[in-house]
Structures are given as structure tokens and as C-alpha cells.
Image (spheres, rainbow, N blue to C red):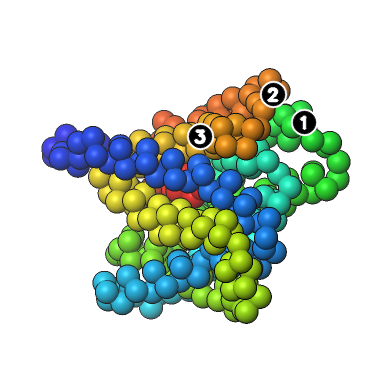
Amino acid sequence: MSAGESTGRRPDAGLLPHLVLVGTLVIWSLSFLAAARVRVDLGVAHAVAARFLPVLVGSAALLLWRRPRLPRSAWPVILAMGLLGVPGYNVFFFIGLKTVPSGTAALIIALSPVLAAVFARLWLGERFGPRKRVGLLLALCGVFVVIRYGTERPVDWPYLSAALLLAGAPTAWAMYTVLGKKLPPEVDTLDATLAILCVGSLPTALFVDRELLRVLAASPGALGASLYLGVFCTLVGYLAWNWALRRLPASEVAAFVFLNPPLANFWAWLLVGDRLRAPFVAGALVLLAGVALIVLGVRPRRGAPIPPEVESAAEP
């Protein structure tokens, strides 16, 4: 057994996969500002449709080009994952981004590995030891501090309800991730990802109407943000992440998710002038420490399935 095989790293991996991951996280960290910009002009249904119309076209074209042979047993799981990962995740995402600042939203979304570990324990019987329990407690305390004390806005019911609804996004993604453990092992990861994106994006096409096209034509900002979310954050981002995941250990790839909240807050400070308050920074550090306790240190043996809390790091 070679060194590359024993660690999950390809011997010729080199620096390029790490650079690809950094670039992917830079792209994803801007998704919160882009989503907030889309919500300025579009309602939730139109915002989801605007993001995923290019995803539907792109994923369908790639599937036709690749001509995958997915087993019939995989399709019920693909359908469920598509509904959870596209409309399920993004409805909550766009609702929350109407009110919750992008930096706070990035930290709430970072709960997905935590929730995935909990669901994996409840549904799959996976181990949830003392380290993960401490991580869960820290993450929940951190997100409470960020939401309650980390904003200059009034912490009233509209703000709290938006934050709670936004938490539905990582919940949907965690369920999506754990459900992915049900995919047959012979299914190609790239083909399954494209099929999930295509199937999940299909219902959003029902909300493409003249009003949506009129608003996008009249608002270059909303159109550009929608294309950024669909083409770069989803199609390019997913494919880049999966490409790197094939060349590096899963736990090493998962560690890059910790770049997302700091980068998202940096862009919010640089581009829209959000101020980082001390309670926000403290809560963010506690939250990320909790996620780290759950995600980091995961070392799947060769041939073992990737833990769901590691896979869940793949969504912005």
C-alpha cells in the first residue's frame, strides 16, 4: 500500500487541489451577499428560480454529455436529496437573507456539520461521543451569542424569526447529507451530484414567469447576483469541491469549510460596511470551535464511507 493510498491522498495531488479549495471557498463566501442582493428585488420563489434555472440547464447538459448509467435503486435517494438540497435548503436560505446580516448567516449555515452528526446518530446509529457532545454544546452556545448579542439591529421577533427560519437551511442540508449515505456504493459521485442538481432544480422552473424575467431584465444587479449563485456557487463550486475531494482526504477537505464564515464577514465589512462587534467575534470563535470538535480529527479508514458531518461541509 502506498502512502497516498493509506491516507486517502493521491500521490500526485500536489498543491493544486488546495488552491482549488481556497478558490471555491472564496466563491462561496460571497454567496451570502449575492443572495441578499437577489432578495432586494425578488421574492423567495422567484429568487430560488433565478438561481437554479442556469443550474438546471447546466446540469442537464452535462448529464447528456456524460450519459451516466445510474442504477434504478439510486433514484429515490437522488430525488429526495434533490428536493432537500435545492428547494428545501434555498427557501430557508433566501427567507433568512432578507433580514439576517450576511456574516451572521454564514455562521448559522456553519451548523450543518453539527446537525449532520446529530442526524447520523439518530438515523444511522453512528457514534456521537463526548468530543462531539462538547462540540454540539459549544456550537449552540456560539450561535446563540451571535444571534442575540452580535448585531446592532434590534433583536425583535422579525429578526429572531428570520434567524430561526435561516437555521432551516443547514437542517435541510444535514438531512440531505445523511440521506446520501443511502446511495449505492457503485454510484459515481460526479454523476450523482449532477443528477441531484438537475432533479432538485426542476421544480424551481415552475416559478419562471414573465414577471421574473421582467425584473431580471430591469435589474442588472439581481440578474448578476442570480447568475453568480447559479453558475459559480453551484455548478462551478460543486464540481470543484468534488474534484478536490477525489484527490485529498475527506477530513482535510472538510477543514476548508472554516474559511467560509471569516471570508463572508470580511466581504460584508469590505463591501457593505458591516461592523464586527466583540460579542459577534466571541460567539463566532465559540461556534467554530464546536464545529471543529465535530468535524476535525475524522479519519475514515480506507474504503470506509465518508462521515456525513465531513460531507456536509460542501454547501455554502
Give the side of residue 237 with respect to residue 282, left or right. left
Please name the residue that numbered disc 3 is placed on: 263
Label 2, label 1: how many angstroms apart (C-alpha)?
8 Å
Q: What numbered label is drawn on residue 37?
A: none
Q: Position of residue 283 (x, y in %)?
A: 66, 26
N-terminal of the pair, mark 1 or mark 3, is 1
The extreme right residue here reads 156
Residue carrying label 2: 277
The amino acid on which the numbered mark 3 sits, given as a three-letter code, is Leu
Task: Residue at 62%, 73% (x, y): give it.
Answer: 214
Q: Is residue 158 toward the left or the right of residue 179 in the image? A: right
Q: Position of residue 273 (x, y in %)?
A: 64, 33
Q: Which residue is mark 1?
A: 152
> For this rendering, which residue is in front, 110 or 266?
266
Q: Decide which of tag 2 and tag 3 comes sooner along the chain.
A: 3
Q: Is residue 69 above or below residue 157?
A: below
